[in-house]
């Protein structure tokens, strides 16, 4: 039994149909627990006041915004190397989810920055990088939408995703060079000393789990939809031919 | 390959080729800036390097969608793909021709336009150097974007959406060289980084662009 | 309801914006999933019906 068996669309449909209710339920549970815990049961930060509660949305969304792109990159590579259609469709499915996560990270960041930094937006390296990431997502989604032939679209978007990844990383460092930032360091790291305090840490972990599960669920559902849409397209073509 | 470059140059220079359109566009953008920002020369001289870089970048974008589209439509590209030279070479030749008809003229007229924007005298050299180093990368990235969108009916706007984010690193380093040059500061760090970006783009992107072309020619 | 102090507007609008965006994403995903699944079912039904019918 290997992982590649799930590259078969039929097997993927069976498996994902089993996973989706579980992951969806867990996502809802984690999000409710994490956000209620974070919103109602944690104290205010002594410097940031109640705005610290935004962390429960901002950090998970930002993590997923980047990791969704990484997932697209991996799926694109699998498509280019092993030609598994499910992989290409999963990459396509992740695009809109990733862009919404990026948007959430940007918007929550703006609402946090307004009282804390005194500005909605600053041309800080991290913020700027996210804006650029947003543009990359836009281009990727637009390219998928523009090409009719499914295999051509999968190939070209995969190439764009590969090249885009290199340029996204490059832009990240270019932007770092271009302007010094206001943004604090990472909220989570393995180095315990630099971490946020425990009171905020545990609900944050639950929220991250919730966001990740939500992402998995959404991507699975969207991949199913893409598979069905492709089968529908094929059936329509056959009906017209015959 | 030299023939291919020469052919593209001929086509561009002939009537309807659009040669000089980029330069004209550059001139217009630079002329419009003072209308938007006010005629204050001290303010203009501060923003001059950035405006010149942005203008050059946008002018580069103008002629990108024609790079492969005409050859794709009349079948020349199919012939080139089966020709003995590798497709990567074709892409590089096309990008070179694009640079010779767009990037190079832009670099050459930039100092004249810089006068209009009151760029400090010490900045001229670095402006030209940064453009000369950066515009080949712009042409090559553009060739990649054009290769991605060549099969599309209305690829023009999509092409801009795809290519502009890829221009970010080149723009940052290039404009930084020009800005530091104008302010009389050290330029070696951004200059080295700009050269690095351009070099790696020129070395690697022909393969990606050729891959995209092969998909589109299938 | 915890006391959010002077930052109440920021915090609540951040939560509000996130919920709206997430809700849009989830609803759009489910809506599209249902629509495509339904149309596929219809198309497959058509196929089987066509096969049963003798061609003429």
Image (cartoon, helix red, strand yellow):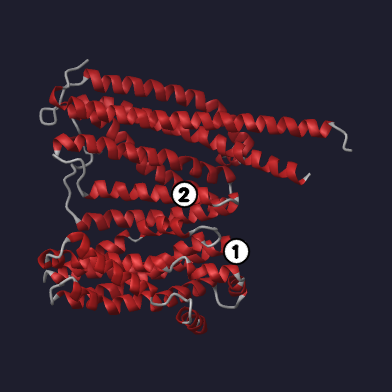
In front: label 2 or label 1: 2
Which of the pair B161/A41 is nearer the observer?
A: B161
Relative to B14, say whether A89 is above or below. above
Instruction: State left or right for residue B80 relative to residue B29.
Output: right
Relative to B72, does residue B100 appear above or below in the rendering?
below
The reply, left or right, for residue A84 in relation to residue A205 is: right
Percent of width and height locating residue B90: 51, 74
Q: Is residue B189 visible?
A: no
Q: Which mark is residue B217?
A: 1
Of B48 and B206, which appears nearest the observer?
A: B48
Give the residue displayed 42% in from the left and 74% down from the top: B98
Q: Looking at the picture, how far across and down is residue C35, in whole percent?
A: 58, 30
Q: Gap in Å between the C-alphas at discs 2 and 1?
A: 21 Å
Residue C22 is left or right of residue A149, and the answer is left
Report if the CB atoms under discs 2 and 1 are less than 8 Å apart.
Answer: no
- Chain holding disc 2: A
Chain letter for mark 1, please: B
Marker disc for residue B26 = none
**Element under label 1?**
helix
Quadrant of the rendered structure where residue B40 is?
Answer: bottom left
Q: Is disc 2 in the same subunit as disc 1?
A: no
Categorize mark 2 by other alpha carbons within 10 Å: few (<14), some (14-19), many (20+). some
| Secondary structure at numbered mark 2 | helix
Please state the horizontal and vertical placement of residue B101, each as a whole percent of the image: 40, 78
**Residue bearing mark 2:** A142
Q: Quadrant of the N terminus of chain A?
A: top right
| Residue C49 image offset from top left, x and y in percent | 79, 30
Q: Is residue A139 visible?
A: yes
Residue drawn 25% across the image and 23% down it: A38
**Left or right side of B142 for A33:** left
**Tally of numbered discs:** 2
């Amino acid at each position: 039994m290997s992982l590649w068996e799930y590259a078969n669309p039929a097997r993927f449909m069976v498996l994902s149909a089993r996973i989706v209710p579980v992951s969806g339920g867990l996502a809802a549970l984690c999000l409710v627990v994490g956000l209620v815990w974070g919103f109602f049961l944690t104290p205010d930060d002594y410097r940031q006041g109640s705005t610290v509660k935004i962390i429960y949305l901002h950090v998970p969304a930002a993590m997923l915004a980047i990791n969704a792109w990484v997932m697209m990159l991996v799926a694109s590579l699998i498509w280019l190397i092993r030609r598994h259609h499910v992989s290409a469709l999963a990459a396509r499915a992740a695009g809109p989810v990733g862009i919404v996560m990026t948007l959430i990270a940007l918007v929550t960041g703006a609402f946090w920055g307004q009282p804390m930094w005194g500005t909605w937006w600053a041309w800080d390296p991290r913020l700027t990088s996210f804006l650029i990431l947003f543009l990359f997502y836009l281009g990727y989604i637009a390219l998928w939408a523009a090409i009719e032939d499914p295999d051509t679209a999968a190939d070209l978007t995969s190439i764009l995703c590969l090249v885009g990844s290199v340029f996204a990383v490059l832009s990240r460092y270019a932007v770092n060079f271009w302007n010094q930032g206001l943004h604090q360091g990472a909220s989570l790291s393995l180095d315990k000393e630099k971490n946020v305090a425990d009171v905020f840490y545990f609900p944050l972990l639950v929220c991250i789990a919730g966001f990740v599960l939500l992402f998995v669920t959404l991507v699975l559902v969207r991949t199913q939809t893409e598979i069905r849409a492709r089968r529908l397209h094929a059936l329509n073509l056959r009906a017209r031919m015959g | 390959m030299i023939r291919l470059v020469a052919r593209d140059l001929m086509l561009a220079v002939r009537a309807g080729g659009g040669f000089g359109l980029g330069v004209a566009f550059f001139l217009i953008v630079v002329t419009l800036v003072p209308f938007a920002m006010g005629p204050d020369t001290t303010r203009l001289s501060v923003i001059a390097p950035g405006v010149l870089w942005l203008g050059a970048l946008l002018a580069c974008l103008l002629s990108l969608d024609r790079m492969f589209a005409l050859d794709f439509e009349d079948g020349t590209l199919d012939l080139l793909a089966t020709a003995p030279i590798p497709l990567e070479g074709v892409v590089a030749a096309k990008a070179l021709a694009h640079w010779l008809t767009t990037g190079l003229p832009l670099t050459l007229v930039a100092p004249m336009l810089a006068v209009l924007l009151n760029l400090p005298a010490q900045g001229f050299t670095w402006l030209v150097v940064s453009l000369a180093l950066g515009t080949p990368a712009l042409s090559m990235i553009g060739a990649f974007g054009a290769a991605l969108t060549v099969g599309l009916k209305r690829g023009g706007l999509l092409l801009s959406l795809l290519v502009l984010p890829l221009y970010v690193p080149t723009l940052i380093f290039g404009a930084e060289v020009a800005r530091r040059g104008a302010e009389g500061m050290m330029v070696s760090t951004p200059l080295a980084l700009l050269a690095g970006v351009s070099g790696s783009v020129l070395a690697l992107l022909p393969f990606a662009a050729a891959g995209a072309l092969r998909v589109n020619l299938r | 309801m915890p006391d959010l102090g002077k930052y109440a507007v920021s915090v609540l609008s951040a939560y509000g914006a996130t919920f709206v965006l997430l809700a849009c994403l989830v609803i759009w995903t489910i809506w599209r999933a249902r629509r495509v699944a339904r149309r596929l079912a219809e198309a497959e039904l058509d196929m089987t019906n066509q096969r049963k019918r003798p061609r003429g």
